[in-house]
Amino acid sequence: MVEHCLRYRDDEPVGDPAVTVDAFAVQGNATAVRIEPGDDARALLPALDRIALIEINFPSYGDGRGYSAARILREHGYAGELRAVGDVLIDQLSHMRRCGFDAFAPDKPITPDAADKALATWPEVYQKTVDGRSPIWALRHGR
Amino acid sequence: MKILTGNDLGSGHVVWWDGQGWSRHVHDAVDVGDAADTILAAEEAARRVNASYAISATKGADGTVRPDHIKDRIRALGPTVRPDLALQPSDPHSGNWVI
Amino acid sequence: MYQYDQYDQAMVDARVEEFRGQVARRMAGEITEDQFKPLRLKNGLYLQLHAYMLRVAIPYGTLNGRQMRMLGDIADKYDRGYGHFTTRQNIQYNWIKLEDAPQILADLATVEMHAIQTSGNCIRNISSDHFAGAAADEVVDPRPYAELLRQWSSFHPEFDYLPRKFKIAVIASDTDRAAMRLHDIGIQIVKNDAGEIGARFYVGGGMGRTPMIAPVIREFVPALQMVSYAEACLRVYNRYGRRDNKYKARIKILVHEIGADEYRRQVEEEFAHILTLGLEPPQAEFERIAAFFADPGLESGLADGYDRSDPDFAVWADQNTTPHKQAGYRAVVISLKPAGGIPGDATADQIRLMADLAEVYSLDELRVTHTQNIVLPHVKQSDLYALWQKLDAAGLATANLDLIGDIIACPGLDYCSLANARSIPLAQKISARFAEPERQRALGELKLKISGCINACGHHHAGNIGILGVDRKGTENYQLLLGGSEAADTSLAQIVGPGFSEDGIVDAIETVTNVYLAQRAEGERFLDTYRRLGMAPFKEAIYG
Ligand code: HEM
Ligand code: SF4
């Protein structure tokens, strides 16, 4: 399942299968959850410190709800693995990384070299997000 | 008749299937019968055409080919408001062919 | 005007290189058209009727002579000698080769221009008041706010795959010259009772198949929270905007379906959270941007008034120039609507001439208007006559601003693959029918707008007279609409009745104008008479 996974974290991958958001609500001891585009990521906020892996599914690359879900989770302090799965294409990796994803399991494998190149697309960034990079406006004013 | 059209991948030129390859002139278009899907799949895969599709057209007694829909006639001719940019800018009556 | 620093330049250069790689992958067959299409669209490259079409962004419609000259040079070098200025204050080229596209973007980058996010389901080029910085009635210059938003929205990682396209307009006066309330977000910069500057947010306007006028979502967002508020508005949309049906995917449908109050509640909740994250650029950054716009170099102490002894010149000056905030200046509108011409088209030579004239006469500034004309915003009144002579010699001095000849028309079926009918030939016929300048002036302000299909790129819903092209059993047919306005008194035009052929609609328009002339009260514009009388007398005269 994690064969084609690109990971940008040092800890051991979680082996547990991810449960749906609905299932997680009733069997709250699962440590891995999978968010579909229509799910409300906020439902997980009370339990973030117990979760080690959140998969966010992109059934088609054009459905961008997962980007907001990812940022919301990180903005509320989620520190576990955040993995984009499904129709994840190389041209989306850098934006996904900026929204807090630190693992990718694309349907069509992406080589680590190609991914590194894609992640380096933008020399700087205009917005402050959850990736810790200083936005251009901060660099301009020496912060 | 059923004919095939699309755009050249690199140049974007409007092109028509002439039986062997892609011509810029609609009157070179040939009837493909029910072979449209096969030809288009092969040609798209080889990147000899882009955004291709099959349309119906009518062959005139003089051998000219007239796509049934106005949109494809405008593609064949060029913008009706710029006859100077048409493939054959010298033909003053080409605009009438569109409508 | 804003100037890039090394960061802005690096971002645009990075984009050019990214796109060069994507085009190479497509040409080599490493990616399919399905995969490539969204990538090229994010760089403004469509496949249209005759070739690829490139849409170049002109942020908030402002550009300098050097940039304008580059637009002319691109038209010559990579296209067929002309370009089309659009209602979204952009320029489109119709005959682009995919192979050339990366190099065109590279050329544009040398003059701080790009085609980023001019298509696709992302935040599009931000539009603004074409008289910004010159208008006497503005609270402040809206462009620094628009530039702040341009940077925020460029390559925004969360909002690149929205349910649908997203258009923002920023203005700063009560007179709306940007159709602000017909945008996904319309922002009016205002001053509150305490004298502080802030942003009034209108959300959920748009044209297309379901035209809607945006309601106010917040009366006053402090200027230094504008980016955070916009972020909240977009996040709610990205999460809850409809994705099941692309015709219902615009934010206007979300706001309409859940109601402005519920949308506001959700935005406010998100906003409260976002404020805790410190996403807002600091005051110092706003001031850095604003400094670029502060002083274009206007002279003070000039007197108002100029020599009007040439009657042709006087007519043009009355019609096509407007008051300036600085004494001794006027803002000049160059009409791209000669009688019988193609609205919004300009040749490479005309584009370069306008660039030259901007450098000589308008402190090196030009604007593109949403009515598809060009503005020289800062012209000394003492230079008006010389300027007019040069424009006149180049066929650019048509004196028809806001008259019936000043038609907005989308490219229609002559260029657009989505069209039902042609728009341009109709615009040509109408402007030829009403070519007589006295006749146009007698009709007064009359905004006529034509779209070749329901997508409404030609703003037909907002026309005093609107025309919509439809397909009736394979032939072109046109519907007539009356009573729209995109100014501060925004209203949507209503369909009069059954459609017409191309010649039929020109006759119907003439009938409509005759009713107006016969019935108007002292001082009434066409729109005023229509609003007073309603549809009935017009309908009666056309079909009766
Ligand atoms: C020729 C290529 C073009 C294509 C394929 C195209 C496509 C579209 C589509 C599909 C919509 C409807 C969007 C919706 O309602 O969700 C639309 C709206 C719009 N387009 Fe275009 N357009 C083109 C050219 C233009 C041009 C040349 C202009 C300016 C003259 C323009 C300005 C607009 C505006 C102002 C809207 C409308 C309003 C809104 O945002 O609701 N477009 N376009
Ligand atoms: S209104 Fe329709 S025909 Fe006109 S440009 Fe837009 S999509 Fe094309």
Image: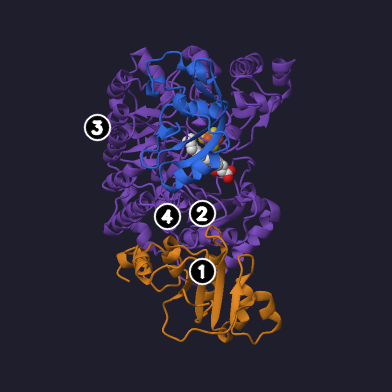
Chain colours: A orange, B blue, C purple
Looking at marks 2 and 3 on the same chain, the residue that comes earlier in the sequence is marked by 2
Same subunit, labels 3 and 4: the answer reads yes
| Nearer mark to the viewer, of 2 and 3 | 3
Distance from Cα at disc 2 to Cα at disc 3: 35 Å
In this image, C290 relative to C240: left or right?
left
Q: Quadrant of residue C30?
A: bottom left
Query: At 69% across and 75% down in the image, what residue appears?
Result: A22
Question: Residue C250: x and y, percent?
Answer: 60, 50
Q: Secondary structure at mark 1?
A: helix
Q: Secondary structure at mark 4?
A: loop
Mark 3 belongs to which subunit?
C
In this image, C414 relative to C111: left or right?
right
Residue closer to the observer: C107 or C486? C107
Distance from Cα at disc 2 to Cα at disc 1: 16 Å
Distance from Cα at disc 2 to Cα at disc 4: 43 Å
Decide: marks 2, 3 in contact (CB < 8 A)?
no
Q: Which mark is residue C199?
A: 2
Where does the C terminus of chain B fall, quadrant-wise?
Answer: top right
Query: At 43% across and 33% down in the image, what residue appears?
Result: B14
Residue closer to the observer: C289 or C323? C289
User: Mark 3 sits on what residue?
Assistant: C360
Decide: marks 4, 1 in contact (CB < 8 A)?
no
| Nearer mark to the viewer, of 4 and 1 | 4
Viewer can see residue A38: yes
Question: Residue B49: x and y, percent?
Answer: 43, 41
User: Mark 1 sits on what residue?
Assistant: C275
